[in-house]
Image: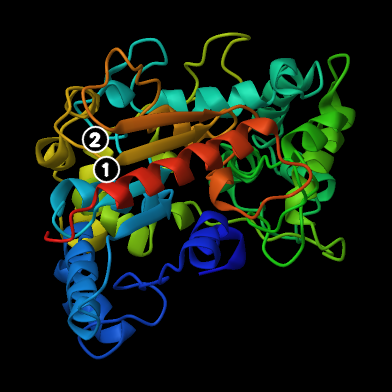
Amino acid sequence: AQCFDIFIILCLKLSRGALLVFAEHRFYGETWPCGGMDTAMEHCMHLMTHEQAMADYVQLLAALRHEDAAAGPVIAFGGSYGGMLSAWMRMKYPGTIHGAVAASAPILGFPGLDFYDSAETGGGGGAYWQIVQDDMGPAAGSAEGCQANAQASFGEIAARSRTSEGRLELERIYGLCEGQLGDDADEDGYRVMMHVLFAYDDYAMGNYPFSSTYISGDFPLPPFPMRVACEPLGGALLEGDELLSASASSVNLLYNASKVEQCFILSERDDELDGIWDYQWCTQLMCQETYFTRGTQRGSGPIFPPYEFNMTFVEAHCRAGYGVSPRPDWIRESYGGADSVVRGEYTNIVFSNGEYDPWRSAGVNNISSQEAQSSVVTVFIAEGAHHLDLMFATDEDPASVTQAREVELALIDQWTAEWGGGE
């Protein structure tokens, strides 16, 4: 675990004497079954499911309880996928997990639920990219004109990519290492457009009110990086080299956070479609925005390159890459959707979501006291990005995240007070 992930958990240790347990997820870090990474990747990928990871944690907790018979109630914490696991562990193992804090947990981001079926944003997860687009607008504090110029930049990239001369111009303006766009395979502009698109994706998730390395690695991004990235694109509609230069300045806030990069290497076409997480997508459709529908957004109109969620492509990709096919209904069949949460089938979970976080689109939001039939609570964090409430407190925090942490700590105290000790 990294320090920025453990604000509330550290509070519990310091003020309430809690034991902190951080368990690594199988197939990540150094936790490889079957003798190591190479062997596991070749022969043991069938052992990689979220259910097996949760069972690992339950066994670990049982072992810890065996060592300490006086152990108290267990509260699960997590953000993003960790938040999904925290909520699901409370749902699946209520005798072991007595409450869960699920921050930015997109547990509703699966087929058969509104996230995929909503006509308003085109279905196929299009609501995710709607929030990224909204973060680029004045209502989120970004410069007027940013959305329009970003949209125009994608069109300009597409136009220049059609010729070898235009692709050389793109290399020069975006600071790409020479020779990357010489092949006619790049005449669709896809790789350059994805280079730009995923910078805005990262800015949205990491749109924190303080300087942070969460998204950028060793070198920090400034506070509210989406607003800063939009500054070069603000104002009147730009054209030609001026437009592309502004776009390059915008995305290089991320790609040259170190301020020492001489040139940039573009990702290959399928770089976003591999690795352990892609295997989890290919078996249980664990959320991956690369595949989500784009180009159907409302408001100022769609600004991102269009893409439509395509299950036929997904199945072909997964069979070719891993020899498996997704089970698109499995998560919904296992845990239900928002109705299951609201009707009171589950208890002792708090779901928090940030206004600027695109994963909010697939989270549990806005359960009113009239709807809720159980102790499941939702917390909305105005001006919040990805699991902001689990990070250390700073002077720059909006009041909303301070209030969210207070709610979460109060619920934890309530759950632990209600714990009977005999479960």
Q: Is residue 104 left or right of residue 204?
A: left
Give amino acid for label 2: Met
311 or 15: nearer the viewer: 15
76 or 242: nearer the viewer: 76
Asked if marks 1 and 2 touch (Cβ < 8 Å), the reply is yes
Q: Quadrant of residue 113?
A: top left
Q: Quadrant of residue 319?
A: bottom left
Quarter the C terminus occupies: bottom left
What's the residue at 81%, 16% (across, down)?
Answer: 144
SS class, disc 2: helix
Whether residue 254 is situated above or below residue 396 in the rendered picture: below
Whether residue 241 is situated above or below residue 235 in the rendered picture: below
Give amino acid for label 1: Val
Q: Is residue 196 left or right of residue 261?
A: left
Whether residue 202 is situated above or below residue 302 in the rendered picture: below
Location of residue 67 in the rendering, given as x and y in whole percent from the top left corner = 23, 85
- How many marks on residues? 2
What's the residue at 13%, 44% (across, down)?
Answer: 327
Residue underneath mark 1 = 314
SS class, disc 1: helix
Report the disc number at residue 311: 2
228 or 200: nearer the viewer: 228
Observer able to see residue 117: yes
